[in-house]
Amino acid sequence: MLHTITPSAMQHLESSYMQAKNVPGILLMEHAAMAVAEAIRSRLPANGRALFLCGPGNNGGDGYAAARLWRASGGQSLIWELTAHVGGDAAVNRTLALEHGIPIETLSSCPSHLPAACELIVDALFGTGLSREPEGLAANLIALVNRAPLPVIAVDIPSGLNGATGAMSAQTVLADETVTFHRPKDGLFLRDGCVFAGHITCAPILIPADYGDPDGLLVLQPSDVRRLLPARPINAHKGTFGRTVLMVGSPGMIGAAAFCARSCLRAGSGLVSILCSERVLPVLQSLVPEAICIALPEESQKAAELVRAALQRADKAAVGCGIGTDPSLLPLLEAFRDAPCPVIWDADALNLLALNPDLLPLKRGDIITPHPAEAARLLGWETGRVVTEPMEALCALYRRTGACVLLKGARSLMTDGDRTAVNPIGTPALAKGGSGDILSGMLTALIGRTSAAENARLAEMQLAAYLHVRAAGRASEMLGEDCVLPEDIINAIRFE
């Protein structure tokens, strides 16, 4: 499991480590450059021609050093720099690059085109310490890079991207890969970060992984999946994997119910019971024959009694997908709020909570799964504020509801109140109605399944978000991102 780090915390950690261990900064810079050179090697032939764009700070120093290492390995390096007046370790690496015969051109204005035969660009203009938007020559150079049909590797963070918030500048490098060091920076995942960072490679630079305070956003890695999801016992039976109760669906929204229930079953739930209107029961039963469908009485109080009885026997539950927002549902929601088992709250259940805040707070073991618009309704915010202040929204939702939060987005955020995590992957294939219902079903199935002794809810949210995207990715490989349907995602669910 990786932890992110803010730029300011990384600067403090580096300084602390170098002082405590008497390690010179240029040695860390050399290891950073080695990682960049390795990234180039994976994209170019051995004699490939790379253009290195170097700024005046340590980020530029990484670029000078990477250019030298690429040259030393047989590649062709050319450096464009914003200024020849650099200091510290960057100045040493600039001198070494010159001594290795690498051409360095100090730009006075932005060229109209890139050098002939250039095959790749390395962005080492500005690092995480950038405090204002690129302007003038630097802005024009970034615009030139973004127009070029060449792969771009960003050093530590794409120039122009805020390393703490993920906010983009007017001119921000659009990278194919970002090679970040020691720990990924928060901004690579937040807001615009996922658009501009491309593939994120986190490379070590001598500092031990557990050095200093590891506090930061948790980032699930592929190797964590099997560690957190133990194999099924050979003597398991259907009760081993949970008795699940879902209250989903209504006339016109049967699909949402079916997607939630089918994904819950596909993700391993042993027994699934669906509480639904008698009007939708026949169709829903045919769509999900593996589930038990229980008709709810029309009278609210009688329906609530049936719901309470079902929840007493359940290990976990979910409510909201396609149920509508009729006020007659409120007694049923009260039953879910008081349920003795963990409950996943999604979709219309969240809209009803927003309209009826007296139902709050929920249990700490419950999970809400809002998208930005649902989050905005719960908080009384504009949707745009949730999008631009996702971390603030995540914390506010936890305080508002008392439950764990999975805030859906291009890179979903999660908190259990103690720790916070970000899903490191995403795909536009999920930008289609029904995808959220699938996530709710998967998350419900995963409740109680992990090996996490602590922060189990957070681990369950991380796994569900990660495996949800992985399933959509597999479906995309077969059908293309535009053509993926919810059914395709469900069929592609794998625990890997």
Image (tube, rainbow, N blue to C red):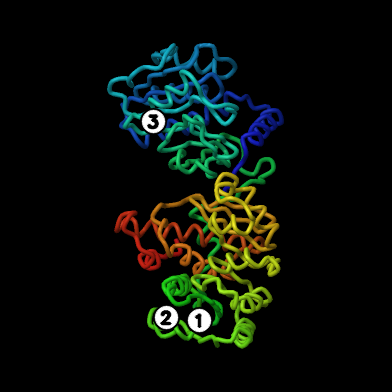
Q: Earlier in the sequence, mark 1 or mark 3?
A: 3
Name the residue nearer the viewer: 277 or 469.
277
> Element under label 2?
helix
Q: Quadrant of residue 435?
A: bottom left
The residue to which callout 3 is attached is 146
The residue sitting at the left extreme is 117
Q: Determine which of the numbered discs, if any, sits on residue 301 in the image.
A: none
> Element under label 3?
helix
> Element under label 1?
strand
The residue sitting at the front extreme is 327
Point out residue 157 in the picture as x, y percentages from the top left corner.
51, 34
In this picture, is 263 found above or below 383?
below
Give the amino acid at mark 1: Cys
Q: How many marks?
A: 3
Name the residue nearer the viewer: 125 or 167.
167
In this picture, is 406 found above or below 52?
below
Which numbered disc, 2 or 3, marks the residue closer to the eye? 2
Give the amino acid at mark 2: Leu
Give the amino acid at mark 3: Asn
Q: Quadrant of residue 240?
A: bottom right
Residue drawn where x is 64% and y is 61% of the image: 404
The residue to which callout 2 is attached is 284
In this picture, is 268 found above or below 98?
below
Whether tag 1 and tag 2 are in contact, CB under 8 A, the answer is yes
Q: Earlier in the sequence, mark 1 or mark 2?
A: 1
Point out residue 230 in the picture as x, y percentages from the top left corner.
53, 67
Residue drawn where x is 64% and y is 44% of the image: 210
Q: Determine which of the numbered discs, if any, sits on residue 276 in the image.
A: 1
Residue drawn where x is 58% and y is 26% of the image: 132
Q: Residues within 10 Å of mark 2 (few under 14, many from 20)?
A: many
Which numbered disc, 1 or 3, marks the residue closer to the eye? 1
